[in-house]
Image (cartoon, grey):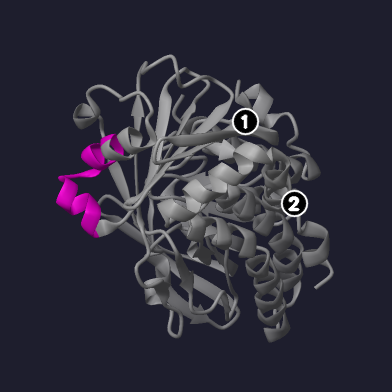
């Protein structure tokens, strides 16, 4: 069911908001909800109509589920009929290993993001979908945005701005001193949804096939569709003739059943996956979620980082509304760098996945000693919230 705007563009423009949040993905929607729950006047803006689909592995790991429970949304995933995840199957060059996962869930981004937006609205946040936001600057103690719907454009203001508009953030292009920079040789993302597919791809398991040109993950969603999400070398994808051909190659290299009619699917791509913002805070500005930085994910870390960062940002944002000083920006930079530091395990996993020989060697070791994989899985799922809050 489509989520309607809760107010008009004109109504949004005549009000001074405590917090403006641009981007209604997991980081933006949860930030809007949590700030609204604390009595702040919040406007959540997104350029898309909701529900909407995004390129994503659609996996929530135990770290993400723990954050949802921490903020009182512990039942949200089950209420959306998510598929419980209990196993990761990793393959490279016709060798594969199966590893148990801690608590996790597969849930389409259409359902998950829409549920978070509804929870933000229920908490008191106002929502404007299909609205483009452009930075104007700071006027006194107010952050200004141009909000555009079709041919109408009006000025809106808020005491604090949260930028959460995702990879390749367009909003930050208008902020002096902040650049969204991709890491050299970063892979790009591509994804699609397939109906049916071989029964070999079962519910409850994340399938990850690794090759020299990238890797592809597959997981069954709540509606039985197969979510396909890949991280690919740009040149290899171009040489293969597109994402469908390269996904077919990766599945064949892994020795897994082929997916029929891949070329006919509605493929979408992403900007470079591994990137960072040159700064994650400015005057009355906080950057959160993929806009702040992203590392190639392994088994759902991307959404876990986004949700956890939103929960940690909330008290800083609320305090800054009540009396902004530069120390609020400094505090968020410090907290964010702690979160970035916790991505070392994911970076290491991404490095291994880039080299099929390393991946195949790892699989051989795990075939003989499967228990060696558990410390890595636990580390990827470990919450850092309490350490970050003490910053």
Percent position of residue 262, x then y:
24, 29
Q: Nearer the viewer, mark 1 or mark 2?
A: 1
Residue at 47% x, 33% y: name it: 110
68 left or right, relative to 283: right
Q: Which mark is residue 347?
A: none
Q: Which residues are magenta?
A: 235-248
Q: Which of 215/105 is in front? A: 215
- 171 left or right of 290 in image: left
Which residue: 70% across, 79% down?
Answer: 324
| CB under 8 Å between discs 1 and 2 | no
Task: Choose between 123 and 112: the one closer to the eye.
Answer: 112
Residue at horizontal 57%, vertical 61%?
348
Taking the magenta stretch, the answer to whether it contains residue 55 is no
Instruction: Give the quadrant of residue 17.
Output: bottom right
Give the residue displayed 70% in from the left and 83% down from the top: 325
Residue holding disc 1? 87
Say whether residue 14 is visible.
no
Q: Position of residue 93 (x, y in %)?
A: 39, 41
Element under label 1?
A: strand
Residue 39: x, y in percent? 75, 53
Name the one closer to the observer, 234 or 320.
234
Res 83 quadrant in image? top right
> Which residue position is annotated with label 2?
382
Is 23 above or below relative to 278?
A: above
Instruction: From the viewer's side, name the closer residue of 336 and 36.
Output: 336
Placement of the C terminus among the 4 image quadrants:
bottom right
Q: Is residue 225 above or below residue 321?
A: above
* 23 shown above or below 248: below
Q: What x and y, as percent, mark residue 170? A: 37, 65
Q: Within the magenta stretch, is there residue 244?
A: yes
Density class for disc 2 (Cα within 10 Å; few <14, some 14-19, many ≥20) is some
């Amino acid at each position: 069911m489509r989520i309607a705007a809760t107010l008009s563009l004109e109504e949004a423009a005549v009000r001074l908001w405590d917090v403006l949040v641009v981007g209604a993905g997991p980081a933006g929607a949860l930030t809007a909800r949590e700030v609204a729950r604390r009595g702040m006047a919040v406007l959540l803006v997104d350029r898309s109509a909701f529900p909407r689909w995004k390129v994503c592995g659609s996996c929530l790991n135990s770290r993400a589920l723990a954050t949802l429970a921490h903020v009182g949304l512990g039942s949200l995933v089950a209420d959306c009929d998510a598929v419980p995840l209990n196993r990761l199957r990793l393959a490279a060059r016709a060798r594969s290993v199966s590893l148990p996962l801690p608590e996790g869930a597969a849930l389409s981004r259409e359902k998950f993001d829409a549920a978070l937006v509804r929870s933000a609205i229920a908490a008191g946040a106002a929502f404007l979908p299909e609205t483009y936001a452009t930075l104007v600057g700071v006027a006194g103690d107010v952050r200004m945005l141009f909000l555009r719907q079709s041919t109408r454009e009006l000025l809106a203001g808020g005491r604090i701005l949260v930028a959460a508009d995702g990879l390749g953030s367009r909003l930050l292009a208008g902020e002096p001193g902040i650049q969204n920079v991709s890491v050299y040789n970063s892979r790009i993302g591509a994804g699609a949804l397939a109906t049916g597919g071989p029964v070999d791809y079962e519910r409850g398991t994340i399938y990850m096939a690794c090759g020299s040109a990238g890797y592809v993950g597959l997981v069954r969603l709540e509606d039985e569709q197969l979510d396909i999400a890949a991280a690919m070398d740009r040149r290899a994808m171009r040489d293969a003739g597109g994402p469908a051909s390269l996904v077919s190659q990766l599945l064949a290299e892994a020795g897994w059943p082929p997916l029929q009619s891949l070329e006919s699917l509605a493929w979408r791509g992403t900007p470079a996956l591994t990137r960072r913002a040159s700064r994650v805070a400015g005057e009355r500005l906080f950057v959160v979620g993929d806009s702040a930085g992203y590392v190639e994910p392994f088994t759902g870390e991307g959404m876990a980082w986004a949700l956890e960062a939103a929960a940690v940002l909330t008290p800083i944002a609320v305090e800054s509304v009540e009396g902004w000083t530069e120390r609020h920006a400094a505090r968020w930079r410090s907290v964010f760098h702690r979160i970035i530091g916790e991505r070392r395990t994911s970076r290491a996993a991404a490095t291994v996945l880039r080299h099929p020989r390393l991946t195949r060697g790892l699989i051989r070791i795990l075939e003989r000693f499967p228990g060696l994989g558990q410390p890595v899985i636990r580390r990827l799922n470990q919450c850092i919230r309490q350490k970050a809050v003490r910053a």
